[in-house]
Image: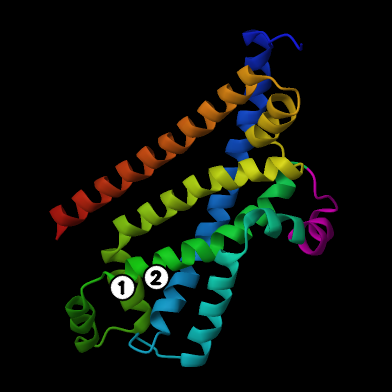
């Protein structure tokens, strides 16, 4: 029977794995935000009742977003390893390589969340901006994004928490991080101490991210009401 790993060794293994997971989540969240928010804005603006109805574009973007969200991440990461990650980075192993499928998988997820957030903006506020002659770009920036700022922060937070789970899956196929530690050292070596410690750390990380983003969203919402 394999002896239980001493706590000192567990901590030595956790530190780099935690750093890799945090690195993957942070960079992937940034890329998901940079591309997911514009995707959500386009989905909302091009809708039949949007600021600039474009039925064909709206349908195409909707199909792409829904298809991207429907593919299981374990399938997506294996698929992208050969056609995107390896040609782009010359490798499909490691935390940096895992960021590519993490970001690609998160963009349509965040895009739909952003679209839902923009739908909640009071239509009368948008109509008032239109009647004043404001440009579409100004309405999007000042009204839609401004009014939905707390919801957008929450959407990014939900995406970041989702990426915690995705990063653990990435560890199964050589992405590194806490997921890799749990599989290789915990599951495959039958080490319950490493397995449960890693699971607890992943759970705590997800809760911490959710708390931080919720806090920021409340602060933004409070300031928005004060300045209104």
In the image, residue 156 lies at what x, y percent? 43, 54
**Residue that numbered label 2 is attached to:** 115
Height in image: 225 above or below 201? Answer: below
Q: Which residue appears at 80% of the width and 50% of the height? A: 92
In the image, residue 124 lies at what x, y percent? 17, 79
Is residue 157 among the parts visible in the rendering? Answer: yes
In the image, residue 224 lies at what x, y percent? 20, 56
Image quarter (top left, top right, bottom left or bottom right) of the C terminus:
bottom left
Is residue 35 among the parts visible in the rendering? Answer: no
In the picture, measured across the screen, residue 81 lies left or right of residue 156, that is right
**Range of the magenta residues?**
80-93
Q: Which of 218 and 140 is in front in this view?
A: 218
Q: Which of 228 and 201 is in front in this view?
A: 201
* Numbered disc 1: secondary structure: helix
In the picture, measured across the screen, residue 180 lies left or right of residue 218, that is right
Determine the main secondary structure of the stretch shown in magenta.
helix
Height in image: 96 above or below 178? Answer: below
**Residue that numbered label 1 is attached to:** 119
* Numbered disc 2: secondary structure: helix
In the image, residue 211 lies at what x, y percent? 36, 38
Q: Which of 39 and 66 is in front in this view?
A: 66
Are dots 2 and 1 in contact, CB under 8 Å?
Answer: yes
Colour scheme employed for the rendering of this structure: rainbow
In the picture, measured across the screen, residue 78 lies left or right of residue 150, that is right
Disc marking residue 144: none
Distance CA(mark 2)–CA(mark 1):
6 Å
In the picture, measured across the screen, residue 195 lies left or right of residue 208, that is right
Height in image: 149 above or below 18? Answer: below
Q: Which residue appears at 51% of the width and 85% of the height? A: 59
């Amino acid at each position: 029977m394999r002896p239980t790993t001493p706590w000192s060794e567990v901590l030595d293994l956790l530190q780099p794995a935690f750093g890799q997971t945090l690195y993957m989540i942070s960079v992937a969240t940034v890329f998901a935000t940079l591309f997911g928010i514009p995707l959500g804005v386009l989905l909302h603006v091009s809708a039949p009742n949007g600021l600039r109805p474009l039925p064909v574009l709206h349908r195409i973007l909707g199909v792409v977003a829904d298809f991207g969200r429907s593919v299981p991440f374990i399938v997506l990461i294996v698929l992208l390893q050969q056609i995107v990650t390896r040609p782009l980075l010359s490798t499909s192993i490691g935390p940096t390589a895992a960021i590519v499928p993490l970001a690609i998988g998160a963009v349509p997820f965040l895009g739909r969340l952003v679209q839902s957030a923009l739908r909640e903006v009071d239509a009368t506020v948008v109509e008032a901006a239109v009647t004043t002659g404001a440009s579409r770009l100004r309405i999007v920036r000042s009204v839609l994004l401004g009014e939905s700022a707390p919801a957008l922060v929450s959407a990014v937070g939900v995406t970041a928490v989702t990426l915690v789970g995705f990063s653990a899956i990435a560890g199964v196929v050589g992405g590194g991080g806490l997921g890799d530690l749990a599989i290789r050292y915990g599951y495959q070596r039958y080490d319950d101490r490493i397995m449960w410690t890693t699971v607890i750390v992943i759970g705590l990380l997800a809760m911490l991210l959710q708390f931080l983003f919720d806090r920021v969203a409340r602060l933004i919402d409070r300031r928005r009401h004060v300045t209104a």
